[in-house]
Amino acid sequence: MKHVTAIIFGTAIVIAAYFLGNAYVKRANPAQIISVTGLGNENFTSDLIVWEGQFSTNNTVLRSAFERLNNDKDIVKKYLVSKGIQENNIIFNSVQTSELRDNKYENGNYVGSTFRGYQLTQSVKIESPKVLLIEEVSREITELLNKGVQFNSSPPRYYYTKLADLKIEMISKATEDARIRAEKIAENSGSGLGNLVSAKMGVFQITGQNSGENYSWGGAYNTTSKNKTASITMRLDYKVK
């Protein structure tokens, strides 16, 4: 029995020594890794436009100001529809009311204010896939001044509704670009490319084409340009054979 126990004990020591020795060798000679970063980018044209503007009116009587604003709203709506914009794309927001006052000063000190009237303001928002049409209307909106409407227009904002599909395609391109770089590095060093160890996606960026915009650590998202460039990076780590 003692003889059997000694054999088992000796075998255990040999196995333990083997694994400890193997771990030491691996630690002394860590696996060689190639780390590469690939880039995927794509130019695209926005397929959704959002345009906003506002109109206002002033009057010393609140009721009269509201009636005038409603009349201006009808004029704005009819104008937009006449330009080919569908009614369901036209959204009027709630009316904002504020008092207009002139501050009074005596000897440089504020002594109160004088009521001058009410200002009522209403904004309108248009969201449409008809990008070219809305662009044209936004440039011609000053025609409302000839109809007596004080209309202020904001620059259009541009979006892309197929962004999720585009992002997947770009990840594929960035991964392929990184793999080709890794293969070239391994080839030039006289080695072979092994298995992929890890993959990490970088920040997704959208900038205007030829705009010279800087990338952001948190990711840029341009909405002022109709024609944009999207880009993404992929960092891959490969073992070396």
Image: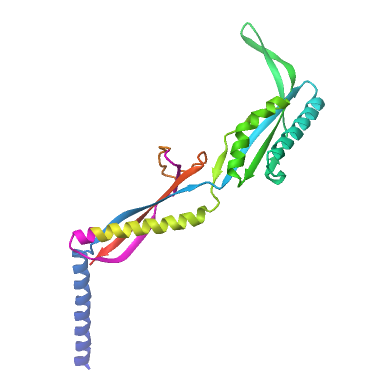
- Whether 205 is drawn above or below 26: the answer is above
Magenta range is 185-210
Q: Nearer the viewer, residue 81 or 109?
A: 81
Q: Nearer the viewer, residue 139 or 237?
A: 139
At horizontal 48% and vertical 48% (from top left) the residue drawn is: 44
Q: Could one spot residue 145 in this view of the protein?
A: yes
Give yes or no for residue 187 being in the magenta stretch. yes
- Quadrant in the picture for the C terminus: bottom left
Q: How many marks?
A: 0
Q: Could one spot residue 119 in this view of the protein?
A: no
- Whether 13 is drawn above or below 241: the answer is below
Residue 77: percent from left, percent from top: 73, 37
At horizontal 72% and vertical 44% (from top left) the residue drawn is: 87
Q: Which colour scheme is used?
A: rainbow
- Whether 107 is drawn above or below 188: the answer is above
Give yes or no for residue 50 being in the magenta stretch. no
- Quadrant in the picture for the N terminus: bottom left
At horizontal 26% and vertical 61% (from top left) the residue drawn is: 183
